[in-house]
Image (cartoon, grey):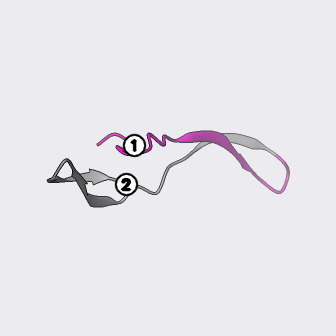
């Protein structure tokens, strides 16, 4: 499953974990994707929203 919203196209963002000593380690902020029902032109299907 792709970590991308099927409706708005939101994708993961990149940043850092920052410790108390200010050491920086790369990390990803994942979007909070939930499966839902979407109706387009009278047809209903499931998509991440």
Q: Residue furthest front?
A: 41
Residue 23, placed above or below residue 49: above
Does 27 sit left or right of 12 as displayed?
right
Per the image, the residue denoted by label 2 is 49
- As for residue 5 lying within the magenta part, the answer is yes
Q: How many marks?
A: 2
> Where, quadrant-wise, is the C terminus in this rendering?
bottom left
Given residues 19 and 43, the one toward you in this image is 43
> Residue 27: horizontal and vertical position, in percent?
60, 43
Which quadrant of the figure has residue 37?
A: bottom left
Per the image, the residue denoted by label 1 is 3
Mark 1: which secondary structure?
A: loop
Given residues 25 and 15, the one toward you in this image is 15
> Where, quadrant-wise, is the N terminus in this rendering?
top left
Which range is magenta? 1-22
Q: Residues within 10 Å of mark 1 (few under 14, many from 20)?
A: some
- As for residue 33 lying within the magenta part, the answer is no
Q: Residues within 10 Å of mark 2 (few under 14, many from 20)?
A: some
Mark 1 → mark 2, Cα distance in angstroms: 11 Å
> Which residue is found at the position 58% from the left and 40% from the top?
13
Mark 2: which secondary structure?
A: loop
> Which residue is found at the position 17% from the left and 53% from the top?
45
> Residue 28: horizontal and vertical position, in percent?
56, 43
Given residues 29 and 4, the one toward you in this image is 4
Does 22 sit left or right of 12 as displayed?
right
Given residues 29 and 10, the one toward you in this image is 10
């Amino acid at each position: 499953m792709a970590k991308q919203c099927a409706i708005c196209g939101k994708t993961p963002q990149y940043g850092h974990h920052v410790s108390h000593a200010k050491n920086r380690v790369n990390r990803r902020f994942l979007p909070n994707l939930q499966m839902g029902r979407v109706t387009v032109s009278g047809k209903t299907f499931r998509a991440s929203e």
